[in-house]
Amino acid sequence: MAYVDFISSLHKSTKRDYIGRVVSADKAECARIAKEYGYDYWDGDRKYGYGGYRYDGRWRSVAEKIAEHYNLKAGQKVLDVGCGMAHLLYELTQTVPGLEVKGIDLSSYALEHAKEEIRDCLQCGKAQELPFEDNEFDLVISLTTLHNLKVFDLKKAVQEIERVSKANSYIMVESFRNDEEEVNMLYWQLTCASYYSVEEWEWLYKEWGYTGDYSFIFFE
């Protein structure tokens, strides 16, 4: 298990008004709507989520880093757990022609509006109940997804990722290293159900038998 950061530079490129997110609207109602993972979360007002999720190529650099780190090759199989609109999976297919990809996500809206080129590689489902065989994938990734699960489902999801991976896996979630980042995270989040510090996440991964790589995004 190793800490590998592919995401921080992309995450930090977005400016966030933490106080504004809390005081500008009914935060509880916004969170309720966001957790439906429908139009409002992806393409509605920013107070409900992304504020418009459009393909703009920003995930190409992340795909290139992942492909290089895991030495991905044509014919290998990659699964994205919580793939959303699958922009990262699409970029992986462009970075490594011939790569076989699959994605799974709870949001039927996201899957219906995913990158058309790989839409037939995606399916609706739960991270804690992956419909795949043991050791099926050369790499399993999950970005900004698992922190949305309560701890009992979180454990199952982590162990499912471990089960379907031949060897390599990578999980990235929201976390915090100090009080300021914890408060900012609480102000900003809409869907998070597992609030853990870096030390707590690392303890949980070891406790649940996770052997893959991991990283975090922080709200600085």
Image (cartoon, rainbow, N blue to C red):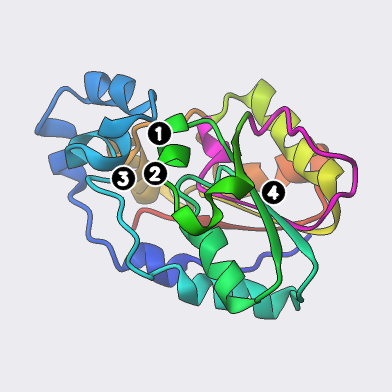
- Residue 29, given in percent of the width and then of the height, sits at 23, 19
The Cα atoms of the two marked residues, 2 and 1, are separated by: 6 Å
Kind of residue indicated by mark 1:
Tyr
In the rendered image, residue 132 lying in the magenta stretch gets the answer yes
- Which of pointers 2 and 3 lies earlier in the amino acid sequence? 2
The Cα atoms of the two marked residues, 4 and 1, are separated by: 32 Å
Q: Residue at 29% x, 39% y: name it.
A: 49
The Cα atoms of the two marked residues, 2 and 4, are separated by: 34 Å
Q: Is residue 102 above or below residue 14?
A: above
- Which of pointers 4 and 1 lies earlier in the amino acid sequence? 1
Q: The residue tagged with tag 1: helix, strand or loop?
A: helix
Locate the C terminus and report the quarter of the image it occupies: bottom left
Marks 2/3 in contact by CB < 8 Å: the verdict is no
- Residue 212, given in percent of the width and then of the height, sits at 78, 56
Q: Which residue is mark 2?
A: 113
Q: Residue at 50% x, 59% y: name it.
A: 117
Pair 4/1: label in front: 1
Q: Residues within 10 Å of mark 2 (few under 14, many from 20)?
A: some
- Residue 156, given in percent of the width and then of the height, sits at 74, 29
**Stretch of the chain drawn in magenta:** 126-148
Marks 3/4 in contact by CB < 8 Å: the verdict is no
Q: Which residue is mark 1?
A: 109
Q: Which residue is mark 4?
A: 202
Locate the N terminus and report the quarter of the image it occupies: bottom right
- Which of pointers 2 and 4 lies earlier in the amino acid sequence? 2
